[in-house]
Amino acid sequence: MKHLFVTFLFSMILCTTLMQGQTSRLAMQYFETGEFEKAASLFEELYEKDKRSNFYFDKYIESLLAMEDYSTAERVVTKRLKKENDNLALYVTQGKILEAQFKDDEAEKLYESAIKKMDSDRLTIIKLGNEFIKMSKFDLAIKTYERGAKLLKDDIIFSYNLGDLYRRKNDTEKMIYYFLNAMENETTRIDNVKLLLERYLTADDWQELQVQLYERLQKNQENVLYTELLAWVFIQNKDYKNALRQVKSLDRRLRENGNRVYELGTMAVNARDYDVAIEAFEYIVDSKDPMSVFYLDAKKELLDTKRAKITDGFDYTSDDLVALKQEYEEFLQEFGRNKATANILMDLASLHAFYLDDLETAIELLEEMIDYPGVNRYLMANGKIELADYYLMKEEQWEATLLYSQVDKEFKDDLLGQTARFKNAKLSYYTGDFQWAQTQFDVLKASTSKLIANDALDLSVFIMDNLNLDTTSRPLELFAKSELLIFQNKFDEAEDLWSTIANDYPQHSLSDDILYKRAEMYTKLRDYEKAAQMYQEVIDVYPEEIRADNSLYALAGLYEKQLNDPEKAQELYEKLFIDFSNSTLAVEARKRYRILRGDFDENGDPAQ
């Protein structure tokens, strides 16, 4: 019997809850459609059944105000105030009723009265502050939190709330001041505050944040938090030099392992701020024990960054190259020549092959690396591809194709295998075996690598166009051989072949391709003005040919990186994605355009 009674009671409660839920939904529907009289009636019914519900009470009052039934609204609030004299939110509701009747002065007095009636209870203070915020009365909310801080005898307890209020008021100086207080008071808020600052500070506001941090550091130099934040500010503004000064200070003060400095060095490399990156990695190498966790990685990054600095943009001297080679050799002396340093050996080989004009040494180094026991198979495969390239530069095509084929076979469905297959197909193209090369290019058009797929498509179309135009394949054979000569750095011989094509086959469709290859050659020779002239000629004389979009993109890159004319580069990128919207380069051109315009940084993040 008792069990039946409990079941019956539970069923009744459930039915009541369901009915109340239906009434609540209907009331909200009336409220949202402007049928306030019906809404008021239902919210009154719901409130009478649940006197603890602030939601029903608030909606009831809002419905009455929408009906302009101020007397009923006042009566309902006064009645509740008699029972809940300490409920400060009711004073705010009363003020809202007075404001609706244009009695602003009386309402203001009520709001001030509510603030004065506060006691030293944090939850009460926050609730009252939120009531004012809901009405967008930010000054009153600020007064609430300021008085609350005095009552609780804690100047920074409500700093986060105050910072957010000053943010809403667009008072940047005070927003920053209170957010800094908030982070000092509760370090778990740091990431949230950083996010807010990143979102709401303008370019000019960052300077104010920097000034306030310096002021705080002068008063309390031992506060690590301010140094961390200052470094963060510099990083946001891409000022890696000043950021490095701060992270080095933190590393020394906290006796860390160099982690912060290493991370900053990596950021600087990505931003092409090579001098700062070099300083960062040198700091770790000079100040940390060789057995420490970041020492070896910093040594490797230091070599890579020094190489990037002198080769990025081809701006280097022979002395620079010799000095860099010496550093690579010193590294290998310190850490040995083994599987752990195999990638360094590959980099040194590349330096010999492409910059020191020493193919023999490059080949010897890679053959040595491939023989190391335990070398990572992917690293070894990359080594074989590079070694094949060097054999090709040395005119030992058989050795090259053998190595490409080995990688293709071992990594058949991998990007490495597709790269090797593409290079092998291109070798066949160089040597005039166009049918086999085109068959391979057609397969590679489906490559998972967009770059390989696009290059394969271009070469396949190129072969088809130029073989079908003539009864002889001689011009294409000469041109393909000239490309191999450029790859081998035999520029004069390539020029001879281009002259032969021009003399023996005047008005041939390869004319734009020869111009394009000449431009690439002059870029390799660091004669950027001449390269620019060649690219421009392709664009002007052959706007309908397939080299036009490539020339536009390459010319824009020259103006951006070598000729130091970002405005001209921006203009060319824009022309490419507008006039050649179907080009595979259009997306990248738009990206470079937006970076130069200042929309994004090199990492794709919104610019400050």
Image (cartoon, grey):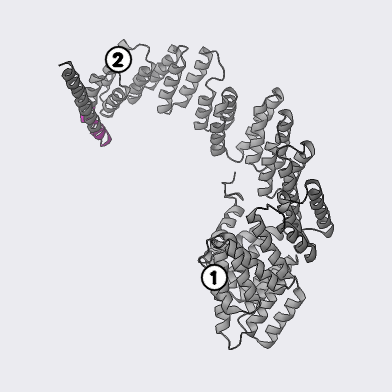
Residue bearing mark 1: 457
On-image quarter of the C terminus: top right
Any part of residue 389 in sight:
yes
Left or right: where 127 falls relative to 215 = left
Above or below residue 39? Residue 317 is below
Q: Is residue 434 left or right of residue 319?
A: left
x and y, in percent, of residue 378 in the image: 63, 56
- Counting from the top left corner in percent of width and height, residue 506 is at 65, 86
Indicate whether 539 appears above or below 451. below
Q: Is residue 285 left or right of residue 509?
A: right
Magenta residue span: 27-41
Mark 1 crowdedness (10 Å alpha carbons): few <14, some 14-19, many ≥20: some
Pick the front one: 355 or 121: 355
Q: Is residue 369 magenta?
A: no
Secondary structure category for the residue under label 1: helix
Which of 425/64 is in front?
Answer: 425
User: Which sits in the foreground, 318 or 522?
Assistant: 318
Residue 565, visible in the rendered structure: no
- Residue at 67% over, 73% down: 517
- For mark 2, give the secondary structure: helix
Query: Mark 1 is on which residue type?
Result: Leu
The furthest residue to the front: 373
- Does 36 lie within the magenta span? yes
The numbered disc on residue 80 is 2
Q: Nearer the viewer, mark 2 or mark 1?
A: 1
